Image (cartoon, rainbow, N blue to C red):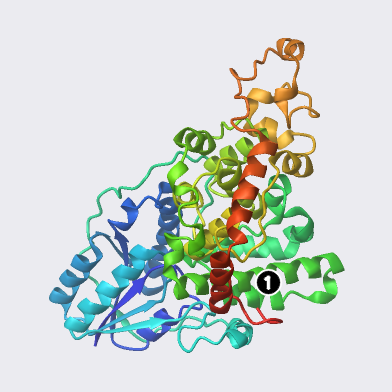
Amino acid sequence: MKKILWFRHDLRLEDNHAFNKACKNGEVLPIYIFDKKYWELETSSSFHLKFIQDSLDELNQVFKEKFNSQLYIFYGDTLEIFKELISKNKFKNIYSNQIFRNHYTLNLDKECAILFKKKNIIWSQEQQFGIQLENRKRNFWSTHWNNYIELKPLKFEINCKFINIDTPSIDKIKTREIDGSNIQKGGRREALSLLKSFLKQRSENYQKEMSSPVTGQVSCSRLSPHITYGTISLKEINFAIKNTKKENLSLNKIKSLRSFRSRLAWHCHFIQKIYDEPEIEWQNMNRAYDGIRENSFNEEFHQAWKIGCTGYPFVDACMRYLKANGWINFRMRAMLVSFASYHLWLDWKKTSKHMAQLFTDYEPGIHYSQFQMQSGTTGINTIRIYNPIKQSIDQDPNGLFIKKWVPELQKVPHKLVHEPWKLTYLEQKDLDLEIGKHYPSPIVDNHSSSKIARDKIWKIKKTDEAKFNAQKILQKHASAKGRR
């Protein structure tokens, strides 16, 4: 029996249910497809492409060394690629792990299912997240997730023959090119190395240091892109945490690891949301907020925010850091989105596309839920308007992060680097710096812009429509009280 093993966002052999099921017997063709239209989407970029290519190179090397075979990589129209493979090789089964991404992949999967059924091919999709796919029961979500995550990770097993075909020629994959100098390296070896160093050393002050971009770069696990593209599984991470010897750990580290594990659950919680309601990618979760920003979009503000030239040093430093690294810690992501949504009053449906390109770990379920939460359009979350000056002083008190990423302000004393517009004319002259020329003046007033935004959001939040919609959202997405 001939089968296709379709790798997607599961670029590993270990704890890969689709791999194990496909390789029980018969002849197997392992493939990966770069879907041409997907890579042309507004949300795709070279940051994602580089990470995936790193991971595929390593996975292909494993196939060569362990199985004397290879992973066949295609680029083009997914349906046409499958049609050609099926017509030439008479495949009867296709195995893959389920993915829950965006509207495009949802439609693509529906089209694939139609094609496979037409060709009398059985498509087996395996679960790789602890979410409820059928008979959704909010009261038991936490129990369901814990039962899943506590399962022992699978070792890979093969009892099949890998099929060899002519290696397809790959044109240069066209996507949005971004010049990042320090993007994380993909591949399973890197994932395992990061997990090991996090559990052994870097997690000691995780809870305390995760909020600052200065300390978060080291103290955060940095596993997020590896989870996104599946070079390591959530069960493997949980298993490693469980097997960390607690008697050798400080109380501080035990709390940090507990906090980190809870984020594995939140990952699946947000995957569940986009599975239950794919529309959160393109429409307000609470429809009472429709039209609130869409008709007043300021493109000049948008461009200033995108390139890190808003006149708010910490905001600009964070955006420039993100553009160079393809990653920044969670609190700073929230601040960047909050600043765009409230201070600049920009529609999240546009700003989310730019950030998706920059996040190497772009995970749509998390991405769009967080954008809506930080933009106030869920109607169920606390309205969080980050004060960029307070965040600057709290997270970068000496201005070292600012001065590294906004070199225009290197000579400014650290007490004034958070608000350089307060420099007097003589101070600017002495520093050979002119605010408004060498570095922009603030494009909006911090106090008045945040107050206007807060008033607008609260005005809607208090309406009967917003309250009614909020109750429906809670019933659909929130876990029952006392459970996650």
**Residue 225 seen by the camera:** no
In-front residue for pair 456/419:
456
Query: Could you say where residue 154 lies in the image, as x and y percent from the top left?
Result: 52, 83
Residue located at (60% from left, 81% from top): 149
Observer-nearest of 251 and 346: 346
Q: What is the residue that sits farthest to the left in this orientation?
A: 87
Residue 286 visible (yes or no):
yes
Among the 4 quarters of the image, the one containing residue 177: top left
Instruction: Identify the image quadrant of the N terminus.
Output: bottom left
Residue 474 at what x, y percent from top left? Answer: 59, 75
User: In what quadrant of the picture does the C terminus appear?
Assistant: bottom right
Q: Looking at the image, which residue is at 62% across and 61% down? A: 462
Decide: is 418 above or below 431.
below
Viewer-closest of 134 and 449? 449
Q: Is residue 324 left or right of residue 198?
A: left
Q: What secondary structure is marked by label 1?
A: helix
Q: Residue at x 44, y 60 (%)?
A: 283
What residue is disc 1 on?
262
As drawn, 475 above or below 295:
below
User: For this view, does 176 lie left or right of residue 197?
Assistant: left
Residue 308 drawn at (x, y percent): 56, 35
User: Please, what is the three-letter code of the amino acid marked with disc 1?
Assistant: Ser
Residue 170 in the figure: left or right of residue 482: left
**344 over 147 or under it: above or below:** above
Q: Nearer the viewer, residue 189 or 462?
A: 462
Say which quarter of the image contains residue 66: bottom left
Residue plotted at (58% across, 84% down) = 138
Is residue 30 found left or right of 212 in the rendered image? left
